[in-house]
Amino acid sequence: VQLQASGGGLVQAGGSLRLSCAASGRSFSKYGLGWFRQAPGKEREFVAAISRDGGSTFYADSVKGRFTISRDNTKPTVYMYLQMNSLKPEDTAVYYCAARSPHKQRFLDEYEYDYWGQGTLVTVSS
């Protein structure tokens, strides 16, 4: 079982980045997926989540209107993306992708997620 996050980097404020997460080793097309982030000295926080079929998406208020979550279930490896626009210095953090078993519904709660990627660092300079 593996979740592999990628796409982080250094970007200026107002710029864009696209994060990717490749999920393999399970039937992740049946799992809810989400993005969390952890800034230096802070607790990990919810960013966005997407339902199994991609029909429902949820965002933290701090990123609503700037970030877009999506997924691709068409291949054996399930991909999830986070398009981040209008980035701000306060978006600087390590971003983690995570997968939630089919029967779990509380997408805001990190403890509902069973599998985690290793994280990818996003740094937004002012």
Image (spheres, rainbow, N blue to C red):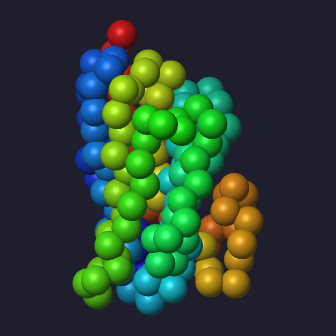
Q: Nearer the viewer, residue 9 or 52?
A: 52
Occupied quadrant, residue 22: bottom left
Q: Position of residue 125 (x, y in %)?
A: 34, 16
Number of callouts? 0
Does residue 90 lie above or below 116 as drawn? above
Q: Nearer the viewer, residue 8 or 57?
A: 57
Does residue 7 lie above or below 111 as drawn? above
Q: Position of residue 30 (x, y in %)?
A: 51, 85
Name which residue lies at 28% across and 33% down. Answer: 16
Q: Position of residue 105 (x, y in %)?
A: 72, 72
Q: Position of residue 113 (x, y in %)?
A: 63, 68
Residue that sits furthest to the top in the current view: 126
Occupied quadrant, residue 61: top right
Q: Nearer the viewer, residue 16 or 55?
A: 55
Occupied quadrant, residue 109: bottom right
- In what quadrant of the picture does the N terminus appear? bottom left
Does residue 88 lie above or below 42 as drawn? above
Name which residue lies at 43% across and 21% down. Answer: 88
Name which residue lies at 36% across and 10% down. Answer: 126
Observer able to see residue 63? yes
Observer able to see residue 121? no
Q: Nearer the viewer, residue 9 or 47?
A: 47
Name which residue lies at 39% across and 86% down. Answer: 25
Does residue 34 lie above or below 40 as drawn? below
